[in-house]
Image: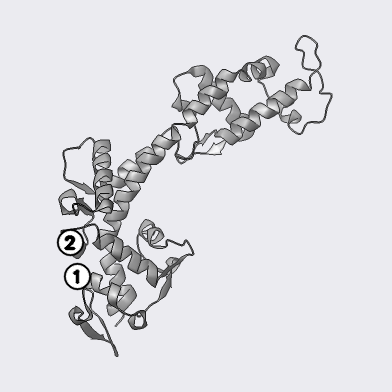
């Protein structure tokens, strides 16, 4: 780490402030007393910068970037690279060969990069760009099983299960999927099955005819108005429907793991591209004068 003797200061306006021009200057920020920082906090909404980058910096999610968050980001970034050339130029392309060897965190980023490159179909490549990473992220977010376990009808090739999902969405309102459409999750499926059973239990035992219900159940009105019919509801109460959707929901972990890799690489590239400039303006404000 840079010592105080290695720090370079310049006069900006009436104040002497740390010059943050290179990646080594960025490392020197870790040793600079916060009393010498121009800013010790900044609201995210007032900063014109990549929104994902700012959210990553704001680790306590309070809407403000604080000194300790800037230092944590610098420490994490500096710990990733043997070759800091990408930091110096603010590159939006990450080179696997620039990452440290023998560092657990750098190894995690390297493995995540390899996963992203496989998603891109370029597993032999040694570099990946921010644009490529974000393209992969969008595609994974469109997966018919989201990372939070929201399942779209197209998640299955079984038309009966697909129709079940569509009917549950229609009856319950479903759950929001990142692709912008509606699917079902465990909560909406459980709600549908519970209320369908309550509705069927309320019907008189007269060869399946759907007379007026005999007990007050909050969901009955919507089931009376639905076009499914009692026979379809009875079919949907068969365990195979729940089991099939539960199996689909279980795939959420795979989607989450893929997105975790993508987001880690995105974080590394964003920090490499923007942290030097951000720290320069947070700690010293040279462009203000």
Q: State the residue at coordinates (18%, 79%).
A: 6
Q: Can residue 231 be seen in this view?
A: yes
Q: Do the residues labelled 2 and 1 touch (CB within 8 Å)?
A: yes
Q: Residue at x 75, y 12 (%)?
A: 208
Q: Residue 230 carries which label?
A: none
At 47% from the left and 18% from the top, the residue drawn is 158
Residue placed under numbered mark 1 in the picture:
24
**In front here: 179 or 2?**
2
Is residue 79 shown left or right of residue 147?
A: left
Sort mark 2 into few (<14), some (14-19) or many (20+) by Cα contacts within 10 Å.
some
68 and 218: which is toward the camera: 68
Q: In which quarter of the image is residue 19?
A: bottom left
Q: Most extreme residue toward the right, as rendered?
A: 214
**Circle 2 residue:** 84
Say what secondary structure mark 2 lies in. loop
The furthest residue to the bottom = 14
Q: Where is residue 42 in the image (x, y as percent from the top left)?
A: 42, 72
């Amino acid at each position: 780490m840079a010592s105080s003797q290695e720090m370079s200061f310049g006069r900006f306006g009436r104040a002497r402030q740390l010059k943050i021009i290179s990646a080594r200057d960025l490392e020197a920020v870790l040793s600079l007393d916060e009393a010498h920082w121009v800013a010790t906090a900044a609201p995210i909404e007032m900063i014109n910068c990549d929104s994902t980058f700012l959210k990553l910096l704001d680790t306590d999610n309070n809407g403000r970037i604080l000194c300790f968050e800037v230092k944590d980001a610098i420490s994490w970034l500096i710990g990733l690279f043997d070759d800091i050339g990408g930091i110096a130029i603010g590159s939006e392309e990450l080179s696997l060969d620039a990452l440290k060897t023998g560092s657990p965190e750098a190894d995690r980023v390297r493995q995540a990069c390899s996963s992203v490159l496989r998603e891109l179909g370029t597993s032999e490549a040694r570099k990946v760009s921010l644009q490529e990473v974000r393209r992969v992220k969008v595609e994974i977010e469109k997966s018919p099983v989201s990372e939070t376990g929201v399942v779209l009808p197209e998640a299955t090739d079984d038309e009966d299960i697909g129709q079940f999902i569509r009917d549950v969405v229609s009856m319950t309102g479903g759950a929001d999927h990142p692709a912008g459409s509606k699917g079902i999750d465990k909560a909406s499926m459980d709600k549908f099955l519970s209320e369908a059973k309550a509705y069927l239990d309320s019907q008189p035992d007269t060869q399946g005819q759907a007379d007026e219900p005999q007990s007050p159940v909050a969901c009955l009105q919507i089931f009376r108005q639905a076009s499914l019919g009692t026979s379809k509801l009875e079919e949907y109460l068969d365990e195979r429907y729940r089991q099939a959707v539960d199996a689909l929901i279980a795939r959420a972990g795979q989607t989450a793991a893929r997105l975790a890799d993508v987001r880690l690489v995105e974080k590394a590239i964003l920090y490499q591209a923007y942290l030097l400039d951000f720290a320069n303006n947070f700690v010293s404000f040279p462009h203000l004068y």
